[in-house]
Amino acid sequence: MSINQELQKQSLEYYLSLKYPMSVYPEEEGYTIIIPDLPGCISQGDTLEEALDNINEAKQLWLETVYCSNKKEIPLPSKLINI
């Protein structure tokens, strides 16, 4: 990582405070939620509330892992599009 990149790196708390758009998929038994901006960040739950709790935990773990590994850049949230 270059000096400029290191100086521009935000704190972990900054990334944890960002609101990432989520895709919610009702299933036969429960819900699946994906955060498209964070590759591989996916979770599920029997209820919508449980699925949301689980995806928030998955998001935190994803961000902490990537932040501490310094292997790739953490993407900023994409803009929401109303359909």
Image: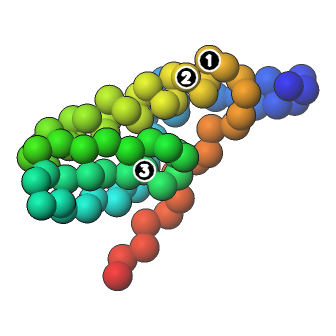
Quarter of the image that includes the C terminus: bottom left
User: Residue 48: x, y in percent?
Assistant: 13, 49
Residue 42 position within the rendered picture, expressed as x and y whole percent measured from the top left: 38, 44
The kind of secondary structure element at disc 3 is loop
Q: With respect to residue 51, does 65 lie above or below? A: above
> CA separation, marks 2 and 3?
16 Å
* Circle 2: residue type: Thr
Whether tag 2 and tag 1 are in contact, CB under 8 A, the answer is yes
Residue 58 marker: none
Identity of the amino acid at label 1?
Cys
Give the quadrant of the N terminus: top right
Residue position for label 2: 65
The tag on residue 68 is 1
Residue 65 picture location, percent across and down:
55, 23
Residue underneath mark 3: 35
State the image quarter where residue 54 is shown: top left
Earlier in the chain: of badge 3 and badge 1, it is: 3
